Image (tube, grey):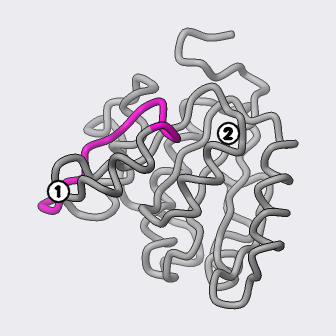
Amino acid sequence: QAEDGIRDTSVTGVQTCALPICDTVLTTPLLRAIRTHWRDAHVTVVASPAGHACLEGHPGVDALITFSPQSTSLPEKIALGRQLARGRFDVTISATEKAWGYIWGAWSRAPRRIGFWAGAQKPLKSMAFRPTLTDRIEEVSDAHEAERHMRLLEPLGVDRKSTRLNSSHRCIS
């Protein structure tokens, strides 16, 4: 296993959950950076139906799991958690601050679980979800959303300043 916790053949999960299509588009530089740094990693993305349509065929994505929070019952959410638990992820990266993103990251049983942390800005949320993350990225409001997403790779040793933010995937054109 590599020092960053990702083996060449590992599974990496990126959750976009209920992010609107525009936020899903803004995760594409993150997906490209994962593929650039770990070419053989298997990348699974949990995305909304619109996000699924956007990411289908994306070169940084190997598998898509569709999740619609507005129409998914609690048993379906739990079933998705169980599916993620069987995924054998080395790392999960949650690009959402939604509760289910934190919960599914924990259920994935990945040794590394990276996500945004509200800290003192939202003390109850921070206290409740702190145990679900092994690497917490402080939320910042003065950065572009794509730049915020790139910060999620910093615990894995990827310098966000060295990664291009533009994307040539069809969803952005």
Would you call the spot at circle 1 few (<14 residues within 10 Å), some (14-19), or many (20 or more)?
Answer: few
Residue 35, by quadrant, is: top right
Magenta residues span 131-142
Q: Residue at x 30, y 64 (%)?
A: 145
Tell me residue 114's x, y (percent).
Answer: 48, 39
Residue farthest to the left?
Answer: 142
* Residue at the disc numbered 1: 121
Count of marks overlaid on the render: 2
- Residues 136 and 160: in front is 136
Give the CA distance from mark 1 to mark 2: 29 Å
Q: Residue at x 56, y 76 (%)?
A: 18
- Residues 33 and 108: in front is 108
Q: Where 106 sits versus 75, above or below?
A: above
Magenta includes 139? yes
- Ranked by sequence position, the earlier of labels 1 and 2 is 2
Q: Which mark is residue 12?
A: 2
- Residues 12 and 111: in front is 111
Q: Where 33 sits versus 158, above or below?
A: below
Tell me residue 96's x, y (percent).
Answer: 46, 62
Q: Is residue 165 left or right of residue 34?
A: left
Magenta includes 69? no
Residue farthest to the bottom?
Answer: 71
Pick the quarter of the image with the N terminus: top right
The residue type indicated by label 1 comes to: Gln
Q: Residue at x 16, y 62 (%)?
A: 141
Q: Secondary structure at mark 1?
A: helix
Q: Is residue 35 left or right of residue 151?
A: right
Tell me residue 24's x, y (percent).
Answer: 51, 71
Which mark is in front, 1 or 2?
Answer: 1
Q: Is residue 123 left or right of residue 48?
A: left
Q: Residue at x 69, y 29 (%)?
A: 90
